[in-house]
Image (tube, rainbow, N blue to C red):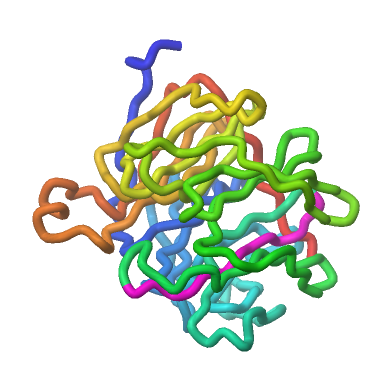
Amino acid sequence: MTMSSIKIECVLRENCRCGESPVWEEASNSLLFVDIPAKKVCRWDSLSKQVQRMTMDAPVSSVALRQSGGYVATVGTKFCALNWEDQSAVVLATVDKEKKNNRFNDGKVDPAGRYFAGTMAEETAPAVLERRQGSLYSLFPDHHVEKYFDQVDISNGLDWSLDHKIFYYIDSLSYSVDAFDYDLQTGKISNRRSIYKLEKEEQIPDGMCIDVEGKLWVACYNGGRVIRLDPETGKRLQTVKLPVDKTTSCCFGGKDYSEMYVTCARDGLDSKGLLQQPEAGGIFKITGLGVKGIPPYPYTG
């Protein structure tokens, strides 16, 4: 597959302040995503090109499918269930109660239907915050929450190996992609190690997803790119550059999960930056990568 067959287009000029957590919903041919500081969950219909938005009462940092219908999302420091039809939300659990300045960041559902998500201190400017205030949690199907570890700076991208034996995780300010041994039955993780350290021009690792070949795709915040990594060799296999700097996350979707969707941010760009990057905050679609993704797992609670 030659690089020249890769096509990158902005399919939605949403002007997200900080677009994040893209998730493909096959049933509605739609892309779900959030705009964190705007407190919005959005659903873009890829057929009609219409966008529906649901505004929450706190920053909403991730969204996921729910097996019983509707969605789940991380809102402030709460795990919530969303009813899209009547635009209502129900709190399932709350974390970090003693840390008033914290909020959730990225989250994703594991292969057993648990909703993993981590926290961070609220930023004073992009990537400027009180360090080591965050933790990684998971919301089990019975709505109880387990905490895995704390001392996290910016809890970010996460996914699981195709054989469900490894959990991949990014704490952004470690500039590393890490791996853990993962027990599908219990949800327990152990034996943390780094599998890739970002290079200077790749900037800050943010959201992440896995493809059908078991390779990881990482969106590089301030790096204007997504990179493809081999978690077994620790080598970078591919770089795809986008026409915006603040790329935040990525997921596969569309027909047979052969397209990649990438979110990005406007916050942190000055007026000159916004002029140079008019599509900043939009949703990008990359076709011709020559590899497919896997469907997202739904929360089973």
Of 36 and 29, the residue lying toward us: 36
Q: Quick one: 150 or 89, which is closer to the camera?
A: 150
Residue 116 part of the magenta-drawn span: yes
Q: Residue furthest top?
A: 2
Residue plotted at (78% across, 52% down): 189
Classify residue 252 as left or right of residue 7.
right
- Residue at x-position 63% and y-position 31%: 231
Q: Quadrant of residue 211?
A: top right
Residue 235, above or below 293: above
Q: Nearer the viewer, residue 264 or 196?
A: 196
Query: Is 204 included in the stretch rendered in magenta?
Result: no
Point out residue 236 in the picture as x, y percentages from the top left corner: 49, 26
Q: Which residues are magenta?
A: 112-124
Describe residue 162's horizontal placement relative to residue 266 as left or right.
right
Position of 121 relative to 248 (above/below): below
Residue 239 in percent (x, y) is at 40, 27
